[in-house]
Image (cartoon, rainbow, N blue to C red):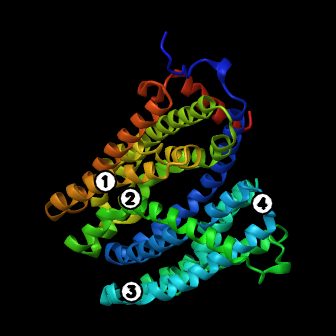
Amino acid sequence: MSSSIDLDVPAVEPEPLPRVRVNALTTLAYRVGGLPFAFAITVITSRYLLPTGRGAFVLALLTVTLASTLLGSVGIAAAHELSRKEHTESSVLRHALVVALALGVVGSAVLFPIDLAFANRAFHNVAYAAFALPAVLVVQTLSSALVAVDRLRFSNLLQLLVPVVTLTAMLFFVIGLGRGTTGAVAAWVVAQIIVAAVAPIGTWRLWAPSSLLSLPRARVASMALLGLRLGVVNVVSLLNYRIELLILERERGLADVGLYSLATSLAELLWLISAALATATISPIVNLEDDAAAALVVARSIRWALGASALLGVALAAGGWFLIPPLFGDAFATSRVPLLILIPGVVAFAPGRILAVYFSMRQGQARLPLAFSLVSLVATTLVAVLLIPRFAATGAAIACTAGYVLSIAAALVWFARSANMSPRALLPRRSTLTSYRALARAIVGR
């Protein structure tokens, strides 16, 4: 008899799995609720900025995202501090907020002149996106820490507010005032600041500011250093997602970046379910005592993520081909081919976040997600350098998909070996469809 885990035996299903489904469904409901707003933002930045303006806007946000990824793991460090149960929740959250705000102010002061120096002369105002960094870090920190203290609903609400407020600001600055790319950047910055103001107000009771200025140096330094170490790992992961975009801008210019960024924005919608599953699996991955039970939770989440992403990918491929020109404008018609190429890679990479949570939080091996991201980064870079000069956005899509597939294949094989199960056990099966039907019934309230 094989020693591998049989994922189709209901009797061994651990108790946390129903909770994973509920938390995943809750998170997914919020993410789906924000989808129309995010989609509308994409439409506005495509139709009103055109490929060149959208390219400048996307690159401006990318630099802020890179900085927030490097500096924005303070919330995870706070969650680690909370798990030690050596300090009160309020004091940890309070100090995490101070650290995040301080890092954001310093980061924006450094980032702004860099962005200003490298921005296209026709779009130098995009550098002002750097001033949103403190607000972005505050929201990221609270969102991560709230999950650790079982405030998932408010964390999800913050994530929903970002596209809602951004769309409202876009309607005012871009359409109402007709400010183009400058207006889009202003709208994004204003939205981040507004949500960052709501976040601490809504969690006031959790971080009661009675001793805000009393900051134990050891704890603050510990959270800051751990956050920066995790940030380095996350920056590599983000570059893995975006390195071809930077190469594309260097080789072909902002217009091609705009065309390709639309394809990536649409393709990454397929990660909606896997992102919700990754958030929902944090608690059982961290708290289950039995390693086999934790591996079972992860394996089933992988199967749900792959199956759901594949089904949505087919729908996106068909819909994207026919709807991109009428929705985003004829100038973006050439985004359809990169989208079709990206979909298989994005589907394959859907379990990436779930595996990252397992390796880093369960096994304490943050170097594994880093190693897999480096594999993908190297593969994507090599293929992009070879193909982008000749094939532009299509070459970028091929490079991205190649990196995703190679990286996730290595990660899945490593997980299967460490969990003592067959890699085939991670592929969707008939029982996975039963789970989809159960989720569908829950969504429609049956």
Element at label 3: helix
Q: Position of residue 53 (x, y in %)?
A: 36, 78
Tag shown at residue 241? 2
Marks 4 and 3, how far apart at CA: 40 Å
Sooner in the amino-acid sequence: mark 3 or mark 2: 3
- Lower sequence index among marks 1 and 2: 2
Q: What x and y, as percent, mark residue 57?
A: 41, 76
The C terminus lies in which quarter of the figure?
top right
Q: Position of residue 107 (x, y in %)?
A: 51, 82
For mark 3, what is the residue? Answer: 114
Q: Amino acid at mark 4?
A: Glu
**Residue 400 has which mark?**
1
Q: Is residue 89 above or below residue 366?
A: below
Residue nearest the viewer, comparing 78 with 20: 78
Labels 4 and 3: the sequence-earlier one: 4
- How far apart are the two marked residues, 4 and 1, measured between alpha carbons? 43 Å
Q: Residue at x 64, y 45 (%)?
A: 280
Numbered disc 2: secondary structure = helix
> Whole-percent x and y of residue 141?
64, 67
Q: CA distance from mark 4 to mark 2?
A: 37 Å
List the residue tagged with mark 4: 86
Q: CA distance from mark 3 to mark 1?
A: 27 Å
